Amino acid sequence: MTTMQINGSETGTVRLFHLDLPPEAVERYTTQAGTGEYPLQYGLGATRLRPAFVDVVAIRDLGDMSLSAYLAEAYQLAGADFRDMRPRIDALQGHVVVLPSQAFDHVAQELTVASPLRWIGTFHEEPARGRGPTPRSKAARSRPAGDTADKVPSDGRMPPLAMIALGVLVVLVIGWLVLGLT
């Protein structure tokens, strides 16, 4: 039995488990029943597990793609720890369960992983990189005094105070026209 701590605030972490079950038993084990029974959650010893984020992979369904290539592509895994484990990951057969951080619903918990699950590794997603080089000019790093870029809604809507002022102005003009014409 393997135990591990899940930090409720973690992001970008992916845990890989081998599932040692015959193919016909995998769906029943990894699917939450309408009655609330969830064998996968029990096998992990998890307090909270979100089925929408559980990825069960039948390795044979990947075809020519290796499991490590799938993980690298689908979860942006690329660190040294992942590269070192690629041969072991690619040697797996049958089914695996991939659990990204979101699967634990941001709840701190201790897992007690039991058979038929076997923990293979915990990996970290590659952080997102900017789309281009970092701007170097002084103008790109600072805003001019009095810049209101953050104060004006970007969707083209008029700010609430401007709408009130415009309403008051319209009432005054209509009142002046009505009083001035009589």
Image (tube, helix red, strand yellow):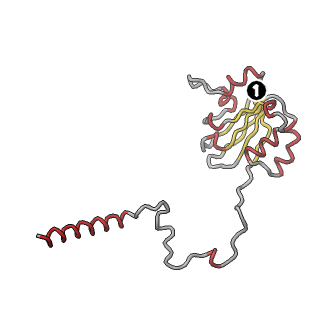
Quarter of the figure with the N terminus = top right
- Number of callouts: 1
Between 173 and 25, the one nearer to me in the picture: 173
Name of the residue lying farthest toward the front: 181
The residue at the point 65 percent across, 46 percent down is 7
Q: In which quarter of the image is residue 166?
A: bottom left
Rendered view: 179 above or below 131: below
Between 180 and 175, the one nearer to me in the picture: 180
In percent of width and height, residue 37 lies at 60, 24
Q: Quadrant of residue 173?
A: bottom left
| Mark 1 neighbour density, 10 Å: few (under 14) some (14–19) many (20 or more) | some
Q: Which amino acid does label 1 sit on?
A: Pro
Residue tagged 1: 116
Q: What element carries label 1?
A: loop
Residue 24 located left or right of residue 181: right
The residue at the point 62 percent across, 43 percent down is 108
In percent of width and height, residue 144 lies at 55, 78
